[in-house]
Amino acid sequence: MRMYVGGGSAGRGSRPLVVALGLAVVLLLAGCGAGSRTPAATATLVPCDFPPPPSPVDVNVLAYNSSAIDPFTNSMVRSCSRDGVTLHHEPIDYAGQAQKTIATLAGRFGTYDILETYGFVVPQQASTGKLHPLDDLVARYGAQFDLDRLNPAMREAMSYDGTLYGIPMQAQMFVMAYRRDVFDRLGLTPPRTFAELRQVSERIQRDGGIRYPLALPLLASSDLATAYDAALGSLGTDYVDRHTGRPNFDTPQAAEAFEQLRSLVPYMDPQVTTFAQPAVQQQMYNGSAAIAIMFSGRMKDLTEVDNSRFAADFAFAPPPSVAGGDVLYNTLSVDGWAIPQNTDVDRDLLFRLVAASVGPESSRAAVPGAFPAREGMVTPDSSPFARAQLESIGRASPPEPYPWTSRISNETRPVVADVLAGRTTIPDGQRQMQEIATAIVAEYRR
């Protein structure tokens, strides 16, 4: 899940609450697309058709750098910078993007004309009039750019109150990576429930020579909220009841989500609440962990032989469910392109640029680092963890497309951290979270 600090997000349907998600970027200016300072020499060229504007136009694109996002951004910059249009994209990590998104949407006039955003924050951004609705533009240009091939569920994730506010680009879902050599040596199979996850972890801890075999991103300032939301969703419970509008933090499922997460603590590094996803990757790279559950965009790095001597030993499976239900310990994050309402660039032109960037060529080039919104791109032939992704995406809990969801996630996160650390009892934590969520929802019910 991802989180906009101060503007907010975290939770189901979102992306890893982040620490810097960006890659180390070498600024190869000589080989970049026009106006871009990101490496675009190898970006895929895609058809990008638009009538030349009457005067030169600069288009500023805000998107963080990662192996999942760069193929789309770089293709757009390289392919569409022509005929009087110049796209600019500066290298930036996720934290920087989050700050700049808040800033550019806050003013009457923004700095950026195209924003990479994600489904979890779309309701909050759209409900406050920050994003331009796209339904009319889809009706006008959808056939030209074959937008019907974009996954309907991902389109829905980029919508609010029945209106589309973002063109979906790619999705991330939880995938479990494990050391096949360790599992084979001990006669283990990938766990399907948290009970099995504890059993497998205990066996590896006892007989496998790995003191802390399980690695989860539980950074207290961000990822921990995603983890709690994923556990709650696997137990069939939303933050807020969809029918009554009443928060669910005082339910038995809310308590069980805490209990189940705490039951995994003995198998994880004592410093786990300081670990974001890069730290979990490092545990797998160096062999200090044998099981990890992260977003699928992190799995490609595990397969790179330059990253780990265990690269050939990693295998992949869908994450387990918490208690044996059909919904997995999982969260689905959908990224897409949005047009801010405060841009002064022609919206038709901007829409053509973003629609071009999610075509079949750039989508195919994004695999396996991304799970493109364009259907049919991810197959066992195109990704070593495709089977795990396909099962995982089909068994994620449904998103909560409400403007209060991200606020509740952000504002209850410190309580989740205190409960998991044992500083607060589970009942006290539930009470605090129920009070916080009730107050937030009440603001929208007035």
Image (tube, rainbow, N blue to C red):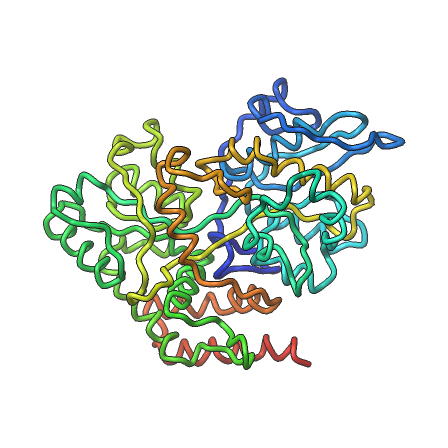
Q: Is residue 323 above or below residue 205?
A: below
294 sits left or right of 288 in the view = right
- The residue lying at 44 percent from left, 57 percent from top is 331
410 sits left or right of 116 in the view = left
- Outermost residue toward the right? 54
- The residue lying at 36 percent from left, 41 percent from top is 385
Looking at the rendering, in which quadrant would you find the C terminus?
Answer: bottom right
Q: Residue 84 at what x, y percent from top left?
A: 81, 27
Residue 57 or 95: which is nearer the viewer?
57
- The residue lying at 70 percent from left, 25 percent from top is 34
- Outermost residue toward the top? 30
Residue 362 or 148: which is nearer the viewer?
148
370 sits left or right of 359 in the view = left
Q: Which quarter of the picture shows residue 420? A: bottom left
210 sits left or right of 436 in the view = left
Say how many tags the image has.
Answer: 0
Q: Residue 106 at what x, y percent from top left?
A: 73, 56
Q: Residue 111 at what x, y percent from top left?
A: 75, 44
Q: Is residue 162 above or below residue 293?
A: below
Q: Residue 43 at what x, y percent from top left?
A: 58, 26
- The residue lying at 52 percent from left, 42 percent from top is 372
Residue 322 or 88: which is nearer the viewer?
322
Q: Which quarter of the picture shows residue 245? A: bottom right
Residue 281 or 371: which is nearer the viewer?
371
